[in-house]
Image: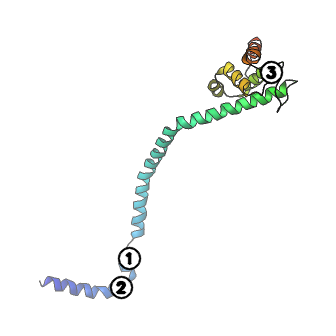
């Protein structure tokens, strides 16, 4: 019991002395905090990077399929526009006559095959798939059908195969 009052007496006597001198009571807690945060960040950054990578890996196939589909559709639109501009007698914004439609499909297909990446062409189904998509995207006359437009266009493509540009 005699120790407790002695400790209390020493603490009460040391209190005013510690308050008078701030340097004696200063604790370098900022240094400790920065050291602790740097150690924590060196451990947490790889964990966060792994979490982001895992998230990307899970969404990559889905995002890739959407982007490829959008790229295929853009290539087909470009092929339709190119074919209508390249063939005399066909005008953008108007229905395409059956007499010039096979040439429009063939020219548009050649353009897509020459300018689009191979992955996009494969996604569209190769040369025949591109031709079929361009055929479906064209505003044809009432007489236009697969027999009167698409088959002659495929024959034109086989007679003069497209070359990569």
Residue 149: x percent and y percent? 76, 18
Graded by Cα atoms within 10 Å as few (under 14), some (14 to 19) or many (20 or more), the crowding at tag 3 reads many
Residue 116 lies left or right of residue 67; in this view the side is right
The correct choice, above or below, for 102 with respect to 116 in the image is above
Q: Which residue is mark 3?
A: 101
- Between marks 3 and 1 in the image, the one whose residue lies nearer the viewer: 3
Residue 26 lies left or right of residue 109; in this view the side is left
> Could you give the CA–CA distance between mark 2 and mark 1, rounded to whole angstroms?
11 Å
Corner quadrant of residue 107? top right
Task: Assign a secondary structure to mark 1.
Answer: loop
Residue 89: x percent and y percent? 88, 24
Residue under the point 35% across and 79% down: 25
| Mark positioned earlier in the residue sequence (3 or 1) | 1
Of 36 and 127, nearer the camera is: 127
| Mark positioned earlier in the residue sequence (2 or 1) | 2
Q: How many marks?
A: 3
- Between marks 3 and 2 in the image, the one whose residue lies nearer the viewer: 3
Task: Assign a secondary structure to mark 3.
Answer: helix
The correct choice, above or below, for 98 with respect to 139 in the image is above
Q: Which residue is mark 1?
A: 26
Residue 53 lies left or right of residue 134; in this view the side is left
Asked if marks 2 and 1 touch (Cβ < 8 Å), the reply is no
Q: Quadrant of the N terminus?
A: bottom left
Corner quadrant of residue 28? bottom left
Q: Which residue is mark 2?
A: 19
> Could you give the CA–CA distance between mark 3 and mark 1, rounded to whole angstroms?
88 Å
The correct choice, above or below, for 132 with respect to 52 in the image is above
Q: Decide if residue 41 is in sight here.
A: yes
Residue 159: x percent and y percent? 76, 11
């Amino acid at each position: 019991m005699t120790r407790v009052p002695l400790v209390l007496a020493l603490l009460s006597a040391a209190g005013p002395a510690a308050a008078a001198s701030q340097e004696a009571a200063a604790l370098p807690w900022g240094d400790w905090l920065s050291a602790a945060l740097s150690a924590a960040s060196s451990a947490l950054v790889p964990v966060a990077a792994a979490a982001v990578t895992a998230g990307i890996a899970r969404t990559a196939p889905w995002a890739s399929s959407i982007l490829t589909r959008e790229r295929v559709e853009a290539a087909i639109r470009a092929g339709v526009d190119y074919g209508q501009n390249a063939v005399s007698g066909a005008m953008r914004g108007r229905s395409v006559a059956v007499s010039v439609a096979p040439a429009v499909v063939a020219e548009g297909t050649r353009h897509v095959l020459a300018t689009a990446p191979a992955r996009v062409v494969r996604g569209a189904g190769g040369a025949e798939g591109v031709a079929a998509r361009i055929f479906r995207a064209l505003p044809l006359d009432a007489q236009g059908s697969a027999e009167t437009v698409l088959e002659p266009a495929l024959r034109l493509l086989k007679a003069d195969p497209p070359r990569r540009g």
